[in-house]
């Protein structure tokens, strides 16, 4: 009868094939890779949740924020910072103004009496699909449209 110590001792045997040893090794490596991936995912989630929590502000903190920079024109939409005059101009020249979707507005170069404004928006076509369009215009410092300089 063998002792417990003898049973626990690893004894290489000719009955264990090299492919079985490789399979055991690969399964251990797969388990390690899975564990590592889970740890990385947990750390990423923790960082994301901390950033999200840091981004939440109370009403008092929002009210304490400084006013917008004096370098931007007036007449901006409070919801998406689009130029109200430029949106009105674009909708006035569309076949279906209800299909207008504002994507973004960039306020580029600032000159003493005007801004160069580029707006990207979506417009519905005859097939019902939204087509992305761009318009560039000169806007005065009061937010009024001076001239459309490019449209594509």
Image (spheres, rainbow, N blue to C red):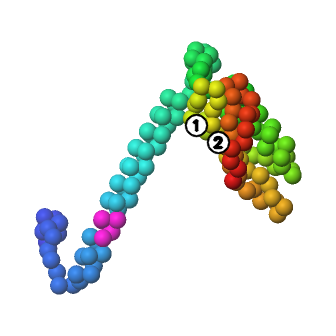
For marks 1 and 2, the one nearer the N-term is 1
Taking the image as drawn, is residue 58 in sight? no
Taking the image as drawn, is residue 21 in sight? yes
| Disc assigned to residue 108 | 1
Which residue is depicted at the point 87% across and 52% down? 95
Quadrant of residue 10 within the rendered picture: bottom left
Density class for disc 2 (Cα within 10 Å; few <14, some 14-19, many ≥20) is many
Q: Is mark 1 in CB contact (under 8 Å) with mark 2?
A: yes
Q: Is residue 77 above or below residue 14?
A: above
- Provide residue 128's location: percent of width, then percent of height: 82, 59
Extent of the magenta region: 26-30
Q: Nearer the viewer, residue 131 or 111?
A: 111
Q: Name the residue under label 2.
A: 118
Q: Which of 93 and 103 is in front in this view?
A: 93
Mark 2 lies on a secondary structure that is strand
Q: On the picture, is 143 further left or further right than 89? A: left
Quadrant in the picture for the N terminus: bottom left
Q: On the picture, is 128 further left or further right than 23? A: right
| Disc assigned to residue 133 | none
Q: Distance between the residues labelled 1 and 2?
A: 7 Å
Q: Which of 26 and 52 is in front in this view?
A: 52
Q: In the rendered structure, does residue 29 fall within the stretch colored magenta?
A: yes
Q: In the rendered structure, does residue 91 fall within the stretch colored magenta?
A: no
């Amino acid at each position: 009868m063998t002792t417990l110590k003898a049973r626990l001792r690893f004894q290489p045997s000719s009955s264990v094939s090299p492919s079985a040893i490789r399979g055991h090794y690969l399964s251990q490596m797969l388990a390690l890779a899975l564990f590592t991936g889970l740890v990385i995912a947990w750390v990423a989630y923790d960082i994301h949740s901390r950033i999200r929590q840091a981004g939440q502000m109370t009403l008092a903190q929002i009210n304490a924020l400084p006013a917008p920079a004096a370098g931007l024109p007036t007449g901006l939409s409070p919801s998406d910072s689009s130029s109200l005059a430029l949106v009105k101009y674009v909708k006035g020249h569309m076949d279906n103004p209800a299909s207008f979707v504002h994507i973004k507005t960039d306020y580029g170069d600032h000159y003493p009496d005007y801004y160069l404004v580029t707006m990207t928006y979506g417009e519905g076509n005859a097939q019902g699909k939204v087509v992305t369009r761009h318009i560039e215009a000169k806007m005065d410092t009061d937010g009024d449209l001076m001239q459309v300089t490019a449209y594509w």
